[in-house]
């Protein structure tokens, strides 16, 4: 982002000395935002940073989808960021102390003892300390504008919270939850006769009064062997369909028949069952308030940005900067 007068925004010429001679370097301008400009190199740098970030997190079709969306919105995002920084400057905001505190917190959370150690840690991630600090400061300034113009003006009435609770009971209904013990026998490398013999041996011990926890520690061939049969707790919809269907028919203390799942057999015991219930209003209140606050904040931000754009001078010279 660089300064330029509106009258001369069509061409930006930078004169530099190279090997003792003067050469003209022309930087193509992508967009003008009030007194600032976005150059092609600015755009490419932002694009490349976003591309690398996405590439490190996603692949295949999901990467393509996210990348295309990012590319479509990138120029508008850069314009919005410039507008918010301009507003921060107009309001006289200073992020110096907040930046200092953020850096101290980052060092503390990551056991980094000094600024030099932080520089080295950032360098190992391919980041330049000064550029990282600038980016941090700009992010804080934009957030400060957001708070000053939008968030501090958001008000949530009790009536709104009550109405939301009444109109969206499905959001506050906790599903049935099952706590299970399990014993698993793998069928891989065994004949059908060997598997049946192992199942009969376990069934006979259960009928003789032995506990599934003890038998799991002795016979189970899954991770529940180490936990004495504890499989954990599962809300409705989290278990594999075959297992859940069998568990739904149990009373606490009952066991399923042997269940054939892929390459093995499961025996499940229902240890505890929490019935579905609707959370009380007081339990749900804080979550509703946060949801309504965020919804109003997002609407307020979009309204504010629309007004900010309307009163700003924005000229896009190259809508698709990477197109030749």
Image (cartoon, grey):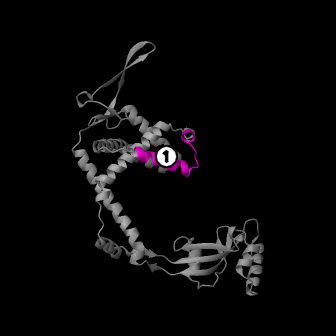
The residue at the point 29 percent across, 26 percent down is 11
Vertical placement of 114 versus 288: above or below? Answer: above
**Residue at position x 38%, y 75% in the image:** 169
Report the quarter where the C terminus lies: top left
Q: Is residue 58 visible?
A: no
Residue at image position (54%, 47%) is: 107
Task: Using the image as rendered, state which of residue 131 and residue 268 is in the foreground.
Answer: 131
Provide residue 215's location: percent of width, then percent of height. 74, 77
* Residue at the farthest bottom position: 208
| Image side of residue 227 versus residue 36, left or right | right
Q: For label 1, count other residues whose C-alpha is less than 10 Å away and answer few (under 14), some (14-19) or many (20+).
A: some
- Whether residue 289 is visible to the viewer of this picture, yes or no, is yes
Q: Is residue 125 left or right of residue 228?
A: left
Q: Quadrant of residue 187?
A: bottom right
Residue 23 in the image, given as x and y percentages of width and height: 38, 16
Front-most of residues 151 and 46: 151
Secondary structure beneath dot 1 equals helix
x, y percent for residue 93 = 33, 45
Side of 270 where 199 appears, left or right: right
Based on the picture, tell me whether residue 109 belongs to the magenta stretch: yes
Residue that protrudes farthest toward the front in the picture: 97
The span shown in magenta is: 96-119
Residue 114 is covered by the magenta coloring: yes
**x 59%, y 49%: residue:** 111
Q: Nearer the viewer, residue 311 or 51?
A: 311
Task: Please state, as top left, top right, bottom left or bottom right, where the N terminus lies in the image.
Answer: top left
Q: Which residue is mark 1?
A: 103
As rendered, which of 89 and 72 lies closer to the eye? 89
On screen, 156 above or below 152?
below
Secondary structure predominantly adopted by residues drawn in magenta: helix
């Amino acid at each position: 982002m660089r300064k330029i007068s509106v009258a001369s925004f069509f061409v930006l010429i930078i004169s530099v000395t190279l090997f003792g001679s003067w050469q003209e370097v022309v930087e193509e301008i992508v967009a003008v935002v009030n007194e600032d400009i976005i150059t092609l190199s600015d755009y490419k740098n932002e694009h490349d940073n976003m591309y690398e970030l996405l590439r490190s997190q996603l692949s295949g079709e999901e990467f393509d989808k996210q990348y295309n969306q990012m590319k479509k919105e990138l120029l508008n995002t850069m314009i919005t960021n410039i507008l918010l920084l301009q507003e921060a400057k107009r309001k006289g905001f200073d992020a110096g102390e907040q930046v200092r505190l953020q850096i101290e917190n980052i060092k503390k959370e990551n056991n980094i003892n000094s600024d030099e150690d932080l520089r080295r840690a950032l360098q190992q991630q391919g980041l330049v300390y000064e550029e990282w600090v600038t980016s941090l400061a700009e992010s804080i300034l934009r957030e400060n504008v957001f708070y000053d113009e939008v968030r501090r003006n958001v008000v949530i009435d009790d009536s709104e919270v009550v109405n939301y609770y009444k109109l969206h009971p499905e959001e506050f209904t906790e599903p049935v939850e099952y706590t299970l013990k399990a014993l698993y026998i793998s069928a891989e490398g065994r004949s059908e006769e060997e598997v049946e013999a192992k199942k009969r041996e376990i069934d006979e011990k259960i009928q003789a009064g032995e506990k599934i926890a003890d038998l799991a520690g002795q016979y189970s061939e899954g991770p529940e062997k180490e936990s004495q049969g504890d499989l954990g707790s599962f809300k409705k919809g989290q278990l594999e369909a075959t297992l859940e269907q069998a568990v739904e028919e149990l009373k606490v203390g009952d066991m399923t028949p042997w269940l054939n799942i892929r390459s093995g057999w499961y025996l499940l015991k229902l240890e505890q069952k929490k019935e579905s219930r609707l959370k009380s209003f007081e339990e749900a209140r804080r979550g509703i308030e946060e949801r309504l606050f965020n919804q109003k904040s997002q609407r307020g931000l979009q309204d504010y940005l629309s007004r900010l754009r309307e009163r700003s001078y924005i000229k896009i010279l190259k809508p698709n900067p990477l197109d030749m």
